[in-house]
Image: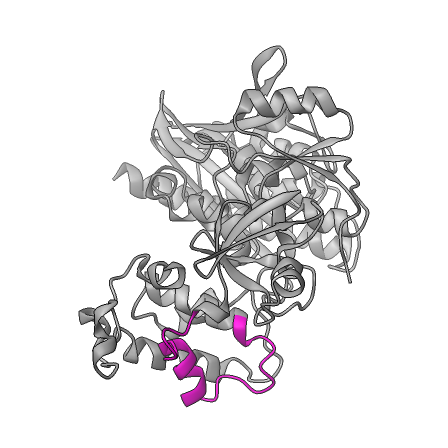
Amino acid sequence: MQVPAQVEYEKAASVEHALALLARYQPGARILAGGHSLIPMMKLRLAQPEVLIDVNGIRGLRYIERAGGELRIGALARHADLLAAPLAGEHFTILHDAERVIADPIVRNWGTIGGSLCQADPSEDLSAAFAALKGSMIIHGPDGRREVSARAFHTGPYETVVGPAEMLTEIRLPIRPGSGSAYLKVARRAGDWPIGAAGAAVWLARGLITDVGIGLTAVGAAGFVAAEAEEFLRGRTADEQTLARAGEIAAEHCRPASDQRGPAEYKRHLVRELTARVLRIAVRRAAEQAS
Amino acid sequence: MKITVTVNGTDYTRVVEPRLLLIHFLRDELRLTGSHWGCDTSNCGACVVWLDETPVKSCTVLAVMADGRQIATVEGLARGGALDPVQEGFTACHGLQCGFCTPGMLMTARWLLDHNPDPTADEIREAISGQVCRCTGYENIVRSVQWAAKHDGGAEGEGDHHGPRLRIAPAQGRPAVHQGAGHLHR
């Protein structure tokens, strides 16, 4: 029987209230959103917070909307919300690609976007997707709010830049014309964590790649990004040979670990193949959008 | 901590430890043992209940998180002694053998049909993809949900308990969205 250890519990009524509770109880407090990562960690004693601050009752943090040339996702939006949001699919197909393979439909009903990001599992899917889209995170703290690039959000496995008295409140994704995006994941079975996964967003102008983002997860890519492959692609023609070469570069520069999900060499193979495939799909989608 | 949770339309107030999981609250505190406690790791789905009209895995939700909210369990499916079409479907199509996964399967099936009255076999399989059955190979579960889809829509409102439960086509019956929650929570 797995049960969490004893813990205190507080309900936050607003972001300000949550921040006040965090300030009062830090460093032993943890924010509880969907709890689908935190509660299992607590059962296993991998996490032992003294106080849980439940943010599920905060109104106005569960939204997906377009504002200021960006798609804005409230931290309390559930995975199922993102998958069901036409606005997300319309601008960033990668998000729907990824959400379809994150956990299972029941878990997606309650797990939150913000919670997944703050859990910062090195195999998490949206971290790679948001890195590919070059999004940013809005973090509220005692000194006000700050904005951090999605690529600088993670500081290591299970670690982010969100301080003990801070709270992630929103994800922002810039909407730019001429783009296409895609996500592919290989897992052992339905609903499982990836053995390896890749996401790509490309911006095209007259057949040239003007900008590109490649996100990788579960394969030891720094900041969930294939930076060298992006560098290689920028300014080049989006032809088959170029995209295949980008896959090779991504595979060379990631650092997968051999584990029960597979040997490092197999994961490198996945990175090479999946990177090339998502780039092909993203380029095709960008072209379709332009036509 | 003192919490009040509405389960199948009835308010229950209890003092619980914050660490108590919702599945144990339902089974041990309220003695509603229809929902099953399975893998404990949000993989098997035997513990699926509705939390505010959304199916969740109750082994991964704290009871205190349900304070002030609505819960629907398998005990709330039958209406006035008449089984819900999903329950009848599982009976008619042999959708269970040992029955351990069944309460979770039923709650997900009811939710699916409330939102998608005529799902394809693939859509049914996707909907239950987070739930494990070790007996049936899923084939009969899919058939059971399809049976329920065909026979859904009878006994719609409060009024039709005057006559026999009519089985009519889904298109004429149960409206697509959130209809199920009404009867579960009434």
- Which quadrant of the rendered structure holds the C terminus of chain A? top left
**Nearest to the observer: residue A75 or residue A233:** A75
Observer able to see residue B142: yes
Observer able to see residue A193: no
Residue A7, image x, y percentages:
75, 40
What residue appears at the point 45 percent right and 33 percent down from the top-left corner?
Answer: A73
Residue A121, image x, y percentages:
69, 42
Residue B153, image x, y percentages:
26, 73
Would residue A17 be found to the left or right of residue A221 on screen?
left
**Nearest to the observer: residue B32 or residue A126:** B32
Number of labels in the image equals: 0
| Magenta segment includes B86 | yes
Residue A109, image x, y percentages:
49, 52
Quadrant hosting residue B122:
bottom left
Quadrant hosting residue B24:
bottom right
Compared to residue A286, the image places residue B70 above or below, namely below
Read off the magenta span. Answer: B77-103
| Magenta segment includes B68 | no
